[in-house]
Image (cartoon, rainbow, N blue to C red):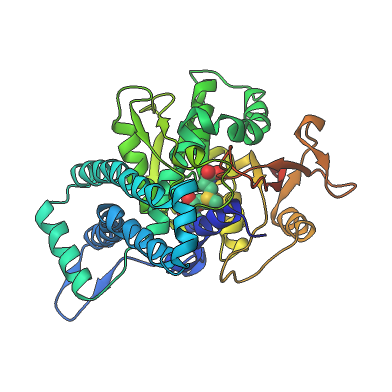
């Protein structure tokens, strides 16, 4: 599959697979370092680690424009390779140079958003401009390239999660999850605790919160996502921000106006009652065994390097009788320790102590006869006006911890 959908989804996975140093819960890092004379406080070492995880994303958002203009410069150079006579036809008919100029100008508009994300991130995480400048200077001296794709991906999630334009995609994915939760018995005095690991920009978590009677925790590892989410949380007016999400990918466009269109966000404001816990799902909830009534995994489980650790962790964090709701594909990324088929996942998780429950036919057709798992076509980070319409046959299940 060679679509934008796959492209962005793979990058989401790549955050997990290539950058997180350790996934295996059993081998989780203990933050205690003892030398001959000094004992370093584990919390300090943790802060240090978090701090260094932030700098590269801040640098990457900061260099948004430069990295993208380097790309448009390449496009310009390639364009120069076509014969002059052909170029003059292209210019007189479609004004290709003007298109390049316009897109470069729009990258400058997007840069304002990227810089606002950096500004808010510095305040939120208490990083001074001097510290960031120092980091950027050292990195650039070493010739380190910033991660343009992760920045673009995080910004495109403003569309998936928080723009009117993402509504259809959310309607593909959310109703079965929300319907299952809505039917659970609960009261506002005794809310059910729900955890959503790998939550991205967290719209599903917020929709769960809107249902009422749930105490919602979302978890996300990528600091690109977390910077974007913290920024989103600081916004106080609906649809007050605009950007041009599609200008960095010129394939599959119907019109140039579509390519250059702007999208406004957030369609609704982020609620402070949803808690974001940053970090690796397999390690940050070390103390929370049995704490959650429900765990919701949306387009998440296939980010695992070690699927068994994900499943064991989901099982450990649920109380007995707690529910695991899943919707997503099985798109394994660059270096998973194991790649299981759906039937193997069912067998393994049943062995770990889950019982798959019957679900409503409106959530898709049964994928494997005799097994309570349904398949449903769901898009991911799709450009709604684009010519590429790929989607996943996402797998939906509700499993009860015995
Ligand atoms: C494919 S994206 C889906 C995001 C979101 N659930 C959605 O549907 O838009 C997977 C997300 O999981 C996050 N992730 C990957 N490994 C993680 C881990 N070990 N702990 C927490 N989040 C993780 C990635 O950073 C990414 O944002």
Q: Position of residue 127 (x, y in %)?
A: 17, 51
Of the pair 362 and 143, the residue shown nearer to us: 143
Of the pair 242 and 178, the residue shown nearer to us: 242
Q: Position of residue 119 (x, y in %)?
A: 20, 43
Residue furthest toward the front?
85
Residue furthest toward the top?
188
Q: Quadrant of residue 130?
A: bottom left
Q: Position of residue 194 (x, y in %)?
A: 53, 35
Name the residue rendered at 23%, 61% in the picture: 48
Q: Position of residue 382 (x, y in %)?
A: 58, 43
- Horizontal relation, residue 202 to residue 369: left or right: left
Vertical arrangement, residue 256 with respect to residue 215, above or below: below
Q: Would residue 397 be seen by someone viewing this image from the given angle?
A: no
Vertical arrangement, residue 76 with respect to residue 370, above or below: below
Name the residue rendered at 63%, 30% in the picture: 171
Q: Quadrant of residue 72?
A: bottom left
Q: Would residue 122 be seen by someone viewing this image from the given angle?
A: yes
Residue furthest toward the right?
369
Name the residue rendered at 67%, 51% in the picture: 329
Name the residue rendered at 50%, 52% in the picture: 250
């Amino acid at each position: 599959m060679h679509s934008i959908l796959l492209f962005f989804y793979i990058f989401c996975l790549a955050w997990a697979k290539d950058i997180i140093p350790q996934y295996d819960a059993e081998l989780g890092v203990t933050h205690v370092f003892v030398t001959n004379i000094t004992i370093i406080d584990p919390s300090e070492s943790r802060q240090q680690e978090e701090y260094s995880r932030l700098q590269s994303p801040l640098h990457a958002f900061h260099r948004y424009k430069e990295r993208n203009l380097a790309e448009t410069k390449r496009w310009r150079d390639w364009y120069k390779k076509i014969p002059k006579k052909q170029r003059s036809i292209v210019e007189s008919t479609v004004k290709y140079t003007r298109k390049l100029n316009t897109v470069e100008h729009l990258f400058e508009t997007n840069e304002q958003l990227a810089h606002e994300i950096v500004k808010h991130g510095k305040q939120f995480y208490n990083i001074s401009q001097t510290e960031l400048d120092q980091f950027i200077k050292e990195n650039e001296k070493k010739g380190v390239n910033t991660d343009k794709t992760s920045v673009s991906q995080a910004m495109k999630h403003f569309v998936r999660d928080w723009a009117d334009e993402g509504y259809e995609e959310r309607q593909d994915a959310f109703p079965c999850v929300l319907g299952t939760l809505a039917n659970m018995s609960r009261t506002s005095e005794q809310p059910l605790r729900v955890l959503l690991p790998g939550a991205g920009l967290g719209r599903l978590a917020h929709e769960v919160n809107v249902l009422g009677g749930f105490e919602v925790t979302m978890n996300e590892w990528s600091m690109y996502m977390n910077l974007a989410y913290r920024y989103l949380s600081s916004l106080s007016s609906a649809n007050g921000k605009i950007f041009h999400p599609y200008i960095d990918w010129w394939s599959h466009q119907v019109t140039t106006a579509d390519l250059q269109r702007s999208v406004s966000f957030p369609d609704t404001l982020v609620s402070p009652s949803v808690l974001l816990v940053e970090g690796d799902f397999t390690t940050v909830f070390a103390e929370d065994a049995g704490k959650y009534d429900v765990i919701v995994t949306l387009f998440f489980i296939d980010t695992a390097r070690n699927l068994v650790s994900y499943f064991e962790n989901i099982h450990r964090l649920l109380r007995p009788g707690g529910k695991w709701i899943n919707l997503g594909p099985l798109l394994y990324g660059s270096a998973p320790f194991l790649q299981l088929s759906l039937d193997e996942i069912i067998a393994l998780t049943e062995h770990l102590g889950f019982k798959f429950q019957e679900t409503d036919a409106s959530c898709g057709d049964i994928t494997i006869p005799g097994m309570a798992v349904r398949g449903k076509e769901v898009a991911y980070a799709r450009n709604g006006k684009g010519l590429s319409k790929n989607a996943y046959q996402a797998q939906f299940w509700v499993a009860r911890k015995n």
